[in-house]
């Protein structure tokens, strides 16, 4: 397995709720930012993928909250790829602040045709680039070590 991609985000005041912690709905937004940056690092910009005739949609998402991140925390989102199917892929994001586990989860994406919105087989070039990043400890996402900002 290659080094797991991770992206850092600074928690903004507006992302915190009245309890002083990041509102739970923002974690999927943070995940989306990290996925976009991972895709950019591996394949270029998202628009290029759509121009090539494929796109990704979220089919299922689950986040398990462990501890709340707070205003001005530097949140690291690690992005281990857990599964590559025929038309789908699963990423198990791990959210940490200063090494402390904040949240983890699982997001299943399905490849689609941008025009028809029908399922589409994962492009071979995408599979070949993502295969080295498959996480061999898929059942232990929360315990996976986080990597740097590069792959």
Image: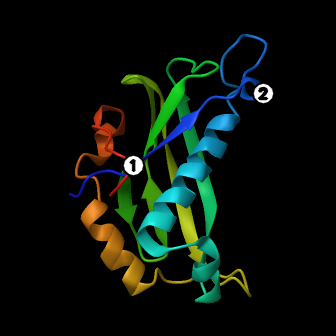
Q: Quadrant location of the C terminus?
A: bottom left
Contact between marks 2 and 1 (CB within 8 A): the answer is no
Q: Quadrant of residue 30?
A: top right
Look at the image and name its color scheme.
Answer: rainbow
**Residue under circle 1?**
149
Q: Is residue 74 above or below residue 7?
A: above
Q: Quadrant of residue 13?
A: top right
Q: Is residue 50 above or below residue 12?
A: below
Residue at image x 24%, y 45%? 137
Residue at image x 44%, y 53%? 91
Counting residues from the start of the chain, the first of labels 2 and 1 encountered is: 2
**Residue under circle 2?**
14
Question: Left or right: 103 with respect to 24?
Answer: left
Q: Residues within 10 Å of mark 2 (few under 14, many from 20)?
A: few
Q: Quadrant of residue 24?
A: top right
Question: Left or right: 18 with respect to 94?
Answer: right
- The dot on residue 129 is none
Q: Nearer the viewer, residue 42 or 53?
A: 42
Q: Quadrant location of the N terminus?
A: bottom left
On the image, the x and y values in percent for residue 50 come to: 64, 81
Question: Left or right: 93 with respect to 133?
Answer: right
On the image, the x and y values in percent for residue 34 come to: 53, 50
Secondary structure under badge 2? helix
Residue at image x 72%, y 10%? 19
On the image, the x and y values in percent for residue 11 come to: 63, 29
Alpha carbons under labels 2 and 1: distance apart: 25 Å
On the image, the x and y values in percent for residue 67 come to: 52, 17
């Amino acid at each position: 397995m290659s080094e797991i991609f991770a992206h850092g985000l600074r928690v903004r005041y507006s992302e915190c709720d009245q309890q002083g912690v990041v509102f739970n709905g923002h974690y999927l937004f943070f995940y989306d930012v990290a996925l976009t940056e991972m895709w950019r690092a591996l394949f270029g910009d998202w628009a290029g993928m759509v121009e090539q005739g494929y796109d990704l949609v979220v089919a299922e998402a689950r986040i398990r909250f462990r501890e709340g991140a707070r205003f001005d925390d530097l949140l690291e989102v690690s992005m281990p790829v857990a599964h590559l199917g025929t038309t789908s892929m699963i990423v198990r994001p791990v959210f940490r602040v200063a090494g402390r586990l904040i949240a983890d989860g699982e997001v299943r994406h399905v490849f689609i045709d941008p025009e028809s919105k029908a399922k589409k087989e994962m492009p071979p070039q995408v599979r070949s680039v993502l295969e080295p990043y498959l996480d061999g400890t898929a059942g232990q996402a929360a315990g996976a070590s986080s990597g740097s900002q590069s792959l």
